[in-house]
Image: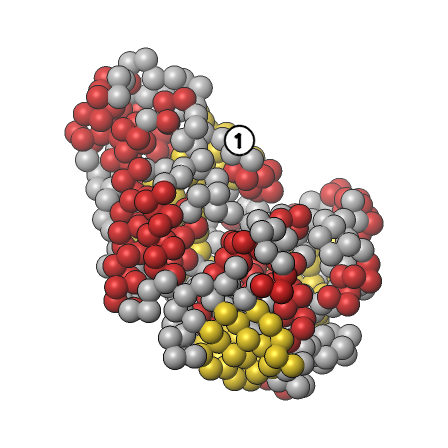
Amino acid sequence: MPAFLSRCLTALACGTVLLFAGGCSDDQISAREGAAKKIFLINNRSEPRFLDLQRANSTAEHQINLALFEGLVAESKNSDRDVEPGVAERWEPNADKSVWTFHIRKNAMWSDGVPITAHDVVWSWRRMLMKELGSEYSKMLFLLKNGEAFYQKKVPAEELGVRAVDDYTLEVALVGPTPHYPSIACHTSWWMVPRHAIEKWGGITDVMNPWFEPGKMVSNGPFTLKRYTFRRYLETERNPRYWDAATVKLDGVRFYAIESDNTEERIFRRGQLHATYNVPLAKIPDYMRDHPDVISNQLNLAIRLYRVNIARGPLKDVRVRRALGFSLDRQSMIDNILRANEKPALGIVPPMEGYEGVKEFRFDPAEAKRLMAEAGFPDGKGFPTNLNILISKSEVAVQIAEAVQAMWKEHLGISVGIASQDYTVYLTSQQQKDYDIAFGGWNADYYDPATFVDMWVTEGGNNHTNWSSAEFDKLVFDATQCADAEKRLKILHDAEAVALKDAAVLPIYYITRTRLIHPAVKEWQPRALDNRLWKYMDLISPPPPCSMDDELKRD
């Protein structure tokens, strides 16, 4: 265990409530003080499992990495679908867009002053594709020519589709025409890590390498890691060596890990957060009615779903899995539980400009009953009683699971349990396929339907269902070889249909991101991917008046 994690375990005695009441903290600041000091206070919901950029795989880690690191390109401030320069100041493709050339800016450097070069990118992508690293996102780089072959150790590093033409010119060869590659390259799996820092502190794939500890981490984003106290917060500070440091308004960001929606809402009302992660379900209607100026509610490019472990008992039967999907009254869950403008999910891909998604799972209890009877479980007779829905400890997951539990009992006559685990344990259980049915979801990695479809390929890093389909895998591969944009989307549509027919994935709803936002916050823009562009965000001091002034002004 890295030394800093060992030290952090001593912080477990300090609970969240004590932290914000001042019991264990001598450096707690209010939202108003934070605005004056330009320190953004945000709840990030959970502790990061990995601070190594290339091993990160959760939303919590992603938001932190958006502050600490930057890739060749970045999401545009003005549009979810566009990209803007990052470490690369410009780029161009060849005629069929299968090879891209990036020109790295000469004023880009790591936070310790070491210049960033094309060689850093080559080394980083090779590391990302080393099985020993155990990155769940390594398969994103199978888009590189020979990416999968290199991952399987079938070709030498020199045959991987990336090379440094010179210190500041990078050539990227892909498996086929990819006109949307710059959008894909916005994802953190394509970003670079500091070779010199990693090699200084240990082995390049050693999970115990402490290069990401405070005082050792070297990054290249608008902020650097200042401190991380387990179960309290992770704090970043402005990076003066960031190539676009003049644009950065904030002096730092604090990421808290408050799991309870009710706790974070109370802390927000006490004026000690600039942004929450969620809003308690029961309080969303009240905030939308009484305090519309402090609540943000927008449809995200994201889905909540159930993964089904098709290697478990009756779940091996596709008829059972489809019956589970047809017996879910999604609109009822939205109207009676969620109440935040979500949309029922009948397919895997959320509404997306230019793509007509598959609509497979209507609410059809009669069809569900027929399928269950055909599978040998008429009215649930003979169905095992030891199956569980795996959830993390969140209010939404609990209430949705209880509703689903009741629907399956009413429409199918079956009883399932609910198993609740801490978030990191819950993620590990899915990785190890140690579950029956798991509540989860997916936030788009980039603006394209492929980000929701190709994750279900055989042995995909985020599949975790034991489901495999040669037909599906071929369609996903064919999409990577297609230069015709319209035809490519049709191929992805066909692949989505195959995955839904086999029902290893049961869509539930397309989510809205609902947060409470302090009036001091400036530049909190609606974003389909919900990625915070920290370099553009700002805080106003003193904060402008709002409908909750009487509460939020309390320090």
The amino acid type found where label 1 is placed reads Asp
Q: Quadrant of residue 373?
A: top left
- In the image, residue 525 lies at what x, y percent? 45, 72
- In the image, residue 530 lies at what x, y percent? 46, 63
Q: Residue at x 47, y 82 (%)?
A: 92
Which of the pair 20/177 is nearer the observer? 177
> Mark 1 highlights which residue?
434
- In the image, residue 204 lies at what x, y percent? 73, 56
Q: Is residue 542 above or below residue 354?
A: below
Q: Is residue 397 visible?
A: no
| Direction top: furthest residue | 382
Question: Quarter holding the N terminus?
Answer: top right
Element type at marker 1?
Answer: loop
Q: Is residue 224 visible?
A: yes
Which of the pair 257/547 is nearer the observer? 257
Q: Residue at x 77, y 79 (%)?
A: 113
